Image (cartoon, rainbow, N blue to C red):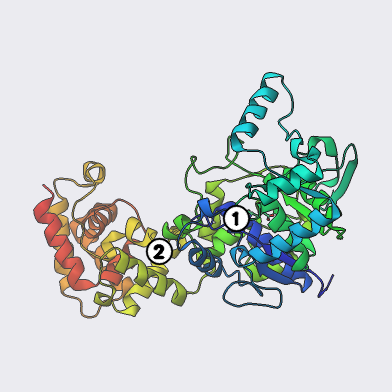
Amino acid sequence: MISDSVRVRFAPSPTGFLHVGGLRTALFNFLFARNTGGRFILRIEDTDRARYVEGAVENLINTLHWAGLYYDEGPLVGGDFGPYVQSERIGIYKQHVDLLLEKGTAYRCFCTPDRLEAMRKEQEKNKLQPKYDRTCLRLSAKELADNISAGKPFVVRMKVPDDISVKFSDIIRGDVEFLSERVDDQVLLKSDGFPTYHLANVVDDHLMKISHVIRGEEWLSSTPKHVLLYKAFGWELPEFAHLPLLLNPDRSKLSKRQGDVAVEDYRDKGYLKEALVNFVALLGWNPGDEREIFSLAELEKEFSLEKVNKSGAVFNVEKLNWLNFQHLRRQTDGEVLSMLKAHLSKMSIDPSKFPDRYLLEVITAMRERVSFVKGFTEKSPYFFSPPEEYDPAVINKRWKPQSAEYLGELSEAFSKMSDPQKGDYEDALHRTAESLKVGNGELIHPLRLAVSGMGEGPGLFDIVSIIGKEETIRRINSAIERIK
Ligand code: GLU
C-alpha cells in the first residue's frame, strides 16, 4: 500500500525521558509511515503543566534522532498543521469547546472539588460506578447565567449520550464495542482553561488529519471517550491500532520500578541503537518467519500493522544482549574503531596512546568475543595496560615451580628475534619447549598468564604479536618476579 494520505503521529507528554515503551510506539508509527509512503508527525502533549519537566522536549527529540527516527512534521521542523506543541494551541481547544457547548454536546460544570469528593465517597459506599452525577446538566438557564456572571469557576464536561452502544474497529484487536453508560461525563476543559488530554488529543488528531492512531494498549480504555467526542463534533473516525502491553519476564506490566526503562539508560550502558531499535521492533511485531535480525531500513520494508499481535510482549534483556552482539558483528571495523576510541576516553584511557593500526588488531582479535564495545576493556584490559594482577585460580592450576625458569628461556628466545611475526613467536616457543624437553603447554599457559593475567582469551600468539616483542618480554620478566 503506497499512500500519501497516511499520516501518523507520536504524541508523547514531556515528562522527562523517553520510555522504551514510548520508543516502541514511536518506532511503529515511523515504520508504518515509511512502509506506506505516509508522514510521521511528532506532537508534544504538554497540557498537563504539573507534569512538565524542563528540557524534556529537547531530550526526547535527541533520543528519537539518536535512534534514527526522524519526523516529517513537528517541533523545530514545522509543517502545514502546526503548531505541534499543545500548549501553543490553547485557543484552538477553547474554540472547539465552544462549538460543543453550542451544539449541546458539552456543558459547564460548577461543582467544587469538595462536592465532587463527597459524591465520589458516597458512590464508593454504595458500590456504584464512580461517575459524575450530572448535577450541573440539570441547571436552569437562569442558574447557569447567574453562575457565569458571578464568575464562578467551571470545567466543561462532555455530555455522553445515554444508553447507546458505540463500536469501533481496531486493526490489531478487531471489533471493539462498549456501552455509553460505562463512560463518565469526561472533563474536556479544566477550570484554568487548559484542555484535558482527551479533548486536545482528539481535536489535534482531527485537525492534523491523522489517518491512523497507533498507540499503546494502556490508551484503549480512553478510546471510547474519543470515539464519542468524534461523534459529538460530527467528525470521521481515524483508524485505531492499540499496541500490546510490554511485560516483565514475570508477565507483570513493565514499569519503572523493575529496572531501567529510559532509552538513554540503554544508550549509556553501551547498547547500539541498531540493537535497541531491532529489539523494540520485535516487541509485538514479527515478520511472519524466523528472521530476527533487522536494520532500520529492513524494518521499514517489512513492517505491517497486520503482523502486530495483541498478546503482551515480554521485555527480555537477554534477547537484547544477543541482538547487541549480532549488530556489533554487523558493524565495520572502522565503525567499531571510532566507538572503541570513544569508550576508551570515557574510561579515562587516552586513545591517542594507541595507533589506529594497533586498535584495529585488537578489534580483529576480540570482536567475535564481545557483545558490547565495553567488552574490549572488560574482557581484554591487557591490550591497554599490563596486567595488574594474575588470576590466582590460573596460578594455582598453571604455574609450576619450573615455570619461571621456562619463561626465562622463552624470553631469551624472543629477544633474539628481529621484527617477529605471529608465526615466529609460535616457532620460538616450540623450539624452546623442545630444548627444555617439555610439552608446549608448560610454556603456553604461563606465557598467557604473564601477558594477560588471565587463563583465557583470543589466540595467545595473537595477543603476543599485537602487544609486540618488547612489551611481551617486559611482561614475562615482571611475571617471573611477581609470581612466586
Ligand atoms: N500524550 C499521550 C502519551 O503520553 C498520547 C497517547 C496517544 O497516543 O493518544 O502517551
Which quadrant: the N terminus?
Answer: bottom right
Location of residue 377 by image quarter = bottom left
- Ligand number 1: quarter of image: bottom right
- What residue sits right under mark 1 in the picture? 22
* Vertical order, 158 against 82 (above or below): above
Q: What distance separates the C-alpha of mark 1 from that of mark 2?
A: 34 Å
Callout 2 amino acid = Met
**Closer to us: 455 or 193:** 193
Kindly identify the residue that appears in the image at 69 percent across and 46 percent down. Answer: 147
Kindly identify the residue that appears in the image at 66 percent across and 65 percent down. Answer: 91
Could you tell me residue 133's position as x and y percent? 75, 33
| 1 or 2: tag closer to the N-terminus | 1
Could you tell me residue 441's position as x and y percent? 29, 53
* Vertical order, 261 against 165 (above or below): below
Location of residue 67 by image quarter = bottom right
* Residue 443 visible to an observer of this rendering: yes
Callout 1 amino acid = Gly
**Closer to us: 126 or 289:** 126
- What residue sits right under mark 2 in the picture? 366
